[in-house]
Image (cartoon, rainbow, N blue to C red):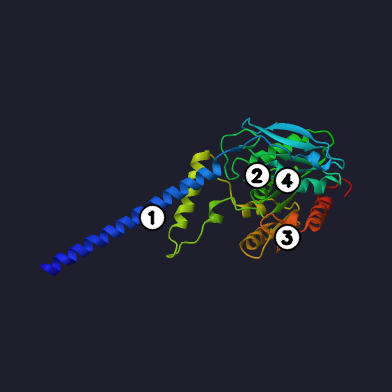
């Protein structure tokens, strides 16, 4: 009897340990996923200060244009001298000031530029950010606004990180955007960004899966398709893909390059950090952008 009671007691302790582990793991998954979903969707709106295109003597205008759901997005617009305008899309945690270095690279060669704050960022309207889901149609509205401006004949787009993915996906159903340069475009879909399930790490996969669903619930937006699908569906238009490092980002951008079906170029900067190319190799970075947009957009091509 003593041995039987000991066995029952041992089994009871084992059950309690198992239940505790399950409760702790479930709680960790829920709390982590919710915290991540809040962090990526909370607005980052604030007045901009101090940095403008005036810093490199650009003659620019403050502009606001409407989204399809009637929010107003704020930006800077520099009219073109060569008939071509590039839409510059900032990364997810930035605002339009982040695109100033690239703007300076292109401005001196006659390109017009539209730099705007994505919704719920900078000085633009909006109460929620959406991992690109609501920003992709805004690229199309930006192109529509540009098409109504005097002197605009051709339109291209550029972005880095999530901005690169948004620029590329925004061009898919907008044939007026004739060329896209995307630096380290981020994954847009949960399927591209889910970690593998392993016994060493059984929590990351369900956490990330739940996280994406919570983002969808919080934004009330259908999550966009994958970045690799955007590269494939972009069609035959020219695309420049830039990557940095030698690991996951390079592999990811290589997959986008392989999916692209038109005139395409992939340039890797192995010593640069994510989106760090303009700072590490400014002269080469500028030349790659100019070669790409000159061949794709110049009116007298």
Mark 2 or mark 4: whose residue is earlier in sequence:
2
Residue 105 left/right relative to 225: right
Alpha carbon distance from label 1 to label 3:
42 Å
Q: Residue 221 shows which numbered tag?
A: none
**Quadrant location of the N terminus in the rendered image:** bottom left
The image's mark for residue 99 is 4
Q: What residue does disc 3 label?
A: 266
From the viewer's perspective, is the residue at label 3 or at label 2 nearer? 2
Q: Tell me the distance, in whole angstroms, between the alpha carbons under discs 4 and 1.
A: 41 Å
Q: Give the mark nearer the N terminus: 4 vs 1.
A: 1
Which residue is most to the bottom?
3
Find the distance from the CA under tag 1 to the CA under tag 2: 33 Å
Report x, y in % for residue 55.
Answer: 80, 41
Q: Which residue is mark 1?
A: 25
Q: Secondary structure at mark 2?
A: loop
Q: Measure the C-alpha gap from mark 3 to mark 2.
A: 25 Å
Query: How far apart are the two marked residues, 3 and 4, measured between alpha carbons?
Result: 21 Å
At 45% from the left edge and 64% from the top edge, which residue is drawn?
A: 198
Find residue 261 and report its horizontal and vertical position in percent. 71, 57
Query: Does label 3 or label 2 sit earlier along the sequence?
Result: 2
Pointer 1 or 3: first along the chain:
1
């Amino acid at each position: 009897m003593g041995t039987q009671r000991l066995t029952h007691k041992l089994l009871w302790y084992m059950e309690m340990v198992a239940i505790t582990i399950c409760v702790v793991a479930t709680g960790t998954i829920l709390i982590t996923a919710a915290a991540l979903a809040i962090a990526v969707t909370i607005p980052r709106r604030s007045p901009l200060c101090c940095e403008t295109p005036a810093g490199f003597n650009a003659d620019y205008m403050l502009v606001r244009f409407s989204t399809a759901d009637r929010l107003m997005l704020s930006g800077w617009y520099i009219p073109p001298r060569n008939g071509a305008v590039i839409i510059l899309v900032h990364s997810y945690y930035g605002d339009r000031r982040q695109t100033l270095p690239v703007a300076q690279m292109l401005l001196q060669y006659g390109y017009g530029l539209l730099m705007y704050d994505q919704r719920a960022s900078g000085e633009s309207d909006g109460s929620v950010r959406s991992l690109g889901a609501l920003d992709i149609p805004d690229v199309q509205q930006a192109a529509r606004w540009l098409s109504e401006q005097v002197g605009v004949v051709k339109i291209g787009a550029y972005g880095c990180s999530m901005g690169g993915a948004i620029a590329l996906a925004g061009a898919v159903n907008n044939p007026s955007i004739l060329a896209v340069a995307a630096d380290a475009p981020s994954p847009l879909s949960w399927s591209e960004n889910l970690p593998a399930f392993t016994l060493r790490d059984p929590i990351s996969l369900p956490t990330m899966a739940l996280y994406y669903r919570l983002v969808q619930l919080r934004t009330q937006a259908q999550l966009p398709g994958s970045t690799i699908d955007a590269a494939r569906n972009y069609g035959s238009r020219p695309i420049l893909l830039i990557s940095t490092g030698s690991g996951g980002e390079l592999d990811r951008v290589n997959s986008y390059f392989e999916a692209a079906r038109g005139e395409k170029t992939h340039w890797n900067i192995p010593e640069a950090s994510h989106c760090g190319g303009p700072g590490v190799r400014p002269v080469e970075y500028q030349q790659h952008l100019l070669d790409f947009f000159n061949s794709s957009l110049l009116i007298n091509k």
